[in-house]
Each structure stands twice: as C-alpha cells, then as structure tokens.
Image (tube, rainbow, N blue to C red):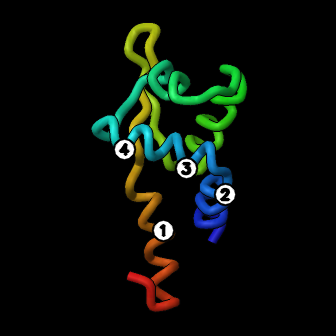
Amino acid sequence: MALLDAVVAALAHPARRQILLTVHFRGGEATSGEIAGRFAHKWPTTTRHLRVLEQAGLLRQEQRGRTRIYRIDRERLTLVSEWLVWFGVR
C-alpha cells in the first residue's frame, strides 16, 4: 500500500501529471531540458517535481554525459490501474 500511496501522491499535482504526459508523448523518454522547456516555472521547481516522480518510481533517470534522460516506469502505473479494478474500472 505504501507504493500505491507514493504513486497517488505524486500524481496529485497537475505539473507532475503534465511531466508524465510530456515524457510519454516524446516517445517515452525526454531530457530534463526538454521537460523544463514545457513549463513556465523556474528550474528548481521542475527538478523538485522530477525528484518526486522518481521517488514514487514513476520516472527513471539515466545520465548520458551531462544530460539526464527520463523514462516512464509503466510498472508503477499499473499499481493504480490494479487498485481501480476493485471499483469496476478497467
């Protein structure tokens, strides 16, 4: 249940949901710069949101030189869909 709680808490903020959509629609991976370029907030705010998504297991990060590449971890998203099945949502 703790993992599900972390995922739901991470998804509670609209900017974090938008980050996931951004990564998804960029083919499942995006650089931190590409993600930050989609938002009006300052860099520290974006990095905080990325960190929350990483801690919840929704994003994975890979370092390539000085560039960070983020990918969605779809396995964590299945926790939400599996929980929703209890309510007849498929």
Three-letter amino acid code of the residue under disc 1: Leu
Figure quadrant of the N terminus = bottom right
Nearer mark to the viewer, of 1 and 4: 4
- Say which residue label 3 marks: 17
Q: Say which label, 1 or 2, has the lower sequence index.
A: 2
- Marks 1 and 4 in Cβ contact (< 8 Å): no
- Spot occupied by residue 41 in the image (x, y as percentages of width and height): 68, 27
Q: Nearer the viewer, residue 43 or 86?
A: 43
- Spot occupied by residue 8 in the image (x, y as percentages of width and height): 62, 62
Three-letter amino acid code of the residue under disc 2: Ala
Three-letter amino acid code of the residue under disc 3: Arg
- Say which residue label 1 marks: 79
- Say which residue label 2 marks: 12
- Spot occupied by residue 36 in the image (x, y as percentages of width and height): 55, 24
Q: Secondary structure at mark 2?
A: loop
Most distant residue in the left direction: 27
Q: Residue at x 59, y 45 (%)?
A: 16
- Say which residue label 4 marks: 24
Q: CA distance from mark 3 to mark 4?
A: 11 Å
Q: Residues within 10 Å of mark 4 (few under 14, many from 20)?
A: some
Q: Residue at x 38, y 54 (%)?
A: 74
Q: Say which label, 4 or 2, has the lower sequence index.
A: 2
Q: Say which label, 1 or 4, has the lower sequence index.
A: 4
Most distant residue in the top direction: 66
Q: Nearer the viewer, residue 19 or 75?
A: 19
- Marks 3 and 2 in Cβ contact (< 8 Å): no
Nearer mark to the viewer, of 1 and 2: 2
